[in-house]
Amino acid sequence: MGRQCHPLLRGGITETKYSDGLPPSETEALNAICEVLLPPDQSNPDIQSFYKSSGAQYPVPHKRRERVLQMWMKHWLLTPIRLPFVFLKFICLFIFFTQVGEDSKNPAWKAMDYNVDIDESWNDGPERRLLDQGIVETMSETESTFADCLRRKGLQVTENGSLYKIQCDVVIVGSGCGGGVAAAVLSGAGLKVIVLEKGNYFTKTDYSSLEGPSMNEMYEAGGILATLDGKMMVLAGSTVGGGSAVNWSACIKTPDSVLKEWAANHKLSLFSSIEFVSAMNKVCDRIGVTDKCLKEGFQNQVCVKKTRIIKYARTAHLFAMIRDSGSGEVKSEGRISYNLSKPDKENIKIGLRRCLRILIAAGAEEVGTHQSDGQRLKCKCITENEVEEFLDSVVAPEGPKSLVEKWTTYCSAHQIGSCRMGVSEKEGAVDENGESWDASGLFVCDSSVLPGAVGVNPMITIQSTSYCISNKIAEMLQKQRDG
């Protein structure tokens, strides 16, 4: 491709010591399923090329296999089979459409008339890798070089066999919206800070605009992390900068109604303080928040300016974001459960219907939802009554593991409130200063401490909360030094 980028974001074949471990019979069955999801088609050269990478050629007739898969997907008594089928379908289609070869291209894209944006204009100027001076890439070091590498970064290290003791004032786990702000505040206060981050470090000159390699390197579990019942896909950044490196940079201050609720209902004075308002202003100034955008994305053009979709001959994908009140739990790594509340489902339904109305008003030829039956409406020459009838059929279905015929999957991009701030041990895991009730000196200052969902993109809320907490940590440590 035309743009230079980081090798990890370029795609191509990655060497691995692992194999799938499947016996020939199971591999053959998997191939047969994949070929149904991505069948060959000889209708024209482009489509033929498009399907050259299809799952397999299998002796059992395609139509018969297709009927079997449809039964797996629809039959409410077959949910134990339906759930793994859904995961397999997601993974199969995701890999097929996003993975690229050594040339950073995918043979399916030509038939889709899809091209990767390689406009260099946004990437003018010299490369700036501001964190390189302080980064220690542990995977690049050995036991014999690790300690010396830390010392070259200005750290005092004591070795005891394979144990390394590093002298510092603060250790921050994670470099996302919360951890990144805390690192800036505490290091700015003259403290020696170490940030632990499992993800790699990329800057704008590294980015490739290739979805597959970028998701794999910059998102938790490669962007394919789901709740145990398959109802919720969880998107979370897993790179230096965390969510702030991969989100849309929608910078919205915490709504006044939310701040009042948190202060009144949860008795958390932080959120009614001038300190928090000042923190939001400082955060916005630091990251350069502006309402003077030079160019809006296509989805925003549809929403704000009612751009005629037909003029662009493109697909607009709108979603409804709700301020959910449901709850869930994480039992161990990757084992997540979550349940939407009744008001959540009602709000999703309302939001979906409004999204569909926007698309129809913008001139869409066809609109639909992600419901398993392919729920859709052709918009040409339809009446208002037909629109209303269709919208009345739009609901918030259950997930694929539920005992229903029609189901869907949802997406969570803002995981919040798993280690909430509270005025007592019964009310939360940490106090109003972000300190653990159980472990002195252990603080939490990311989205985990928020009392509930924000209802808007939460980056500014998280960063502002972290700013307040980390300033209190700096004050506490300074008092300890002086005392």
Image (spheres, rainbow, N blue to C red):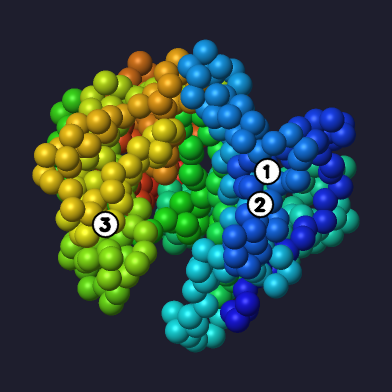
Tell me if 287 is positioned left or right of 30 in this view.
Answer: left
Name, please, the residue furthest toward the bottom.
125
- Left or right position of 437 against 132: left
Type of amino acid at the residue the image marks with label 2: Pro
x and y percentages locating residue 317 in the rendered image: 35, 53
- Is any part of residue 398 visible from this angle? yes
Q: Which residue is drawn at 43% across and 21% down?
A: 405
Q: Which amino acid does label 3 sit on?
A: Ala
Q: How far apart are marks 1 and 3 (CA)?
A: 31 Å
Q: Which residue is label 3 attached to?
A: 364
Which residue is at 28% across, 48% downward? 378
Secondary structure, mark 3, is: loop
Q: Disc 2 designates what residue? A: 40
The residue identified by callout 1 is: 35
Q: Nearer the viewer, residue 190 or 433?
A: 433
Q: In which quarter of the image is residue 225?
A: top right
